[in-house]
Image: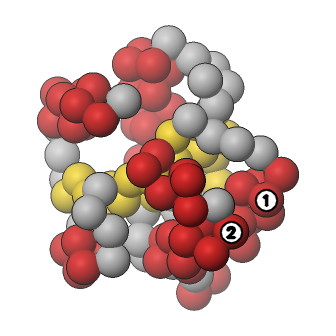
Amino acid sequence: MKILVIEDDEQLQRIFLRFVKMFFKTTDITVVDNARDSIFLLETHDYALVISDFDLKDGTNGGQVLAWLKEHKPAALDRFVFVSANEDVQKLHDRYLPKPCTIDEMRAYFHAFL
């Protein structure tokens, strides 16, 4: 199972890596910190799950990734999840988990739709 994590905070990157390895029993995890790199990877790879923050480095955001998916890979939208402190993302996409959240909340959320 290939998973893409889009998160610019290095501490949260480590937390997501630990969680994803533990919960999904996979080490095929790619972590990027901006929308441009995310879109490049999505152009060339298929992911079982994409976990994205909204506010990213270099003035990019997860909304750009979501817009690209809608246009180029709409079948992947059901595997795209925002995990963000920005509550406005709920207006963009119905798969949203607010930050901060516990490991148990993340586990329950991802278990419910995978």
Residue under numbered circle 2: 72
Q: Position of residue 68 (x, y in %)?
A: 62, 74
Residue under numbered circle 1: 43
Rendered view: 22 above or below 74: above
Residue extending farthest to the right is 44
- Locate the C terminus by quadrant: top left
Instruction: Please indicate whether residue 14 sits to the left or right of residue 112 in the image.
Output: right
Q: Nearer the viewer, residue 92 or 57?
A: 92
Q: Position of residue 51 (x, y in %)?
A: 46, 49
- Locate the N terminus by quadrant: top right
Q: In this view of the protein, can residue 55 be seen by the observer? A: yes
Q: Which is more N-terminal, label 2 or label 1?
A: 1
Q: Which mark is residue 85?
A: none
Amino acid carrying label 1: it is: Glu
Q: In this view of the protein, can residue 65 be seen by the observer? A: no
Amino acid carrying label 2: it is: His
Rendered view: 57 above or below 19: below
